[in-house]
Image: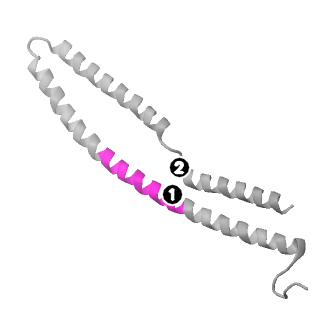
Amino acid sequence: MPGAGAPSGLRGALARLAAVSLGFARTRLELASVEFTEERERTQDRLVLLAVAIVAFAFALLAASAFVVVWFWDTQRLPAIAGVAIFYLVIGGLAVWRLAAARRDDPSPFAGTLAELERDREWLLRRIGGDE
């Protein structure tokens, strides 16, 4: 006769399976929460650095552009303005190209959580398959 506290048979197996599944789900949700927090902090750091870089480079480029245009104002004002504009177009194009490449190469968010869930699924399938 089974112990009074431990259900047996199909009902006991389903209860144990539910308990294990809930434990796995809780662990994976905690992992997802940690990964989300880390991703949010990395994103905030990047945004602050990006804002500082944009402001600093904008002032530097404005000063350099004004210098070039003033330097050539008396002799080649239109080619100087066109040259500065083309320079900015090339830099902007390269930045967009690099941003697209970086976005393609970045790992997907929550990759660790998804990998753990897949391992859990495989373990559970092996476990169910082994008990039959």
Drawn side of residue 98 relative to residue 72, left or right:
right
**Who comes first in sequence, dot 1 or dot 2?**
1
Q: Amino acid at mark 1?
A: Phe
Query: Which residue is depicted at the point 51% across and 58% down?
Result: 35
| Image coords of residue 80 (percent x, y) | 18, 16
Query: Which residue is depicted at the point 23% across and 17% down?
Result: 83
Question: Badge 1: few (under 14), some or many (20 or more) residues near its Cα, within 10 Å?
Answer: some
Which residue was labeled with disc 2?
A: 109
Tell me the chief SS of the magenta region.
helix
Question: Badge 2: few (under 14), some or many (20 or more) residues near its Cα, within 10 Å?
Answer: few
In whole angstroms, how far apart are the C-alphas of marks 1 and 2? 8 Å
Q: Quadrant of residue 78?
A: top left
In the foreground, 74 or 111: 111
Which residue was labeled with disc 1?
A: 36
Q: Is residue 112 magenta?
A: no
Q: Amino acid at mark 2?
A: Pro
Q: Quadrant of residue 5?
A: bottom right
Q: Which residues are magenta?
A: 33-51
In the foreground, 15 or 37: 15
| Image coords of residue 52 (percent x, y) | 27, 46
Query: Please, is residue 121 above or below residue 23 in the view?
Result: above
Location of the N terminus (image quadrant):
bottom right
Query: Which residue is depicted at the point 36% across and 31% down?
Result: 95
- Element type at marker 1? helix
Q: Quadrant of residue 130?
A: bottom right
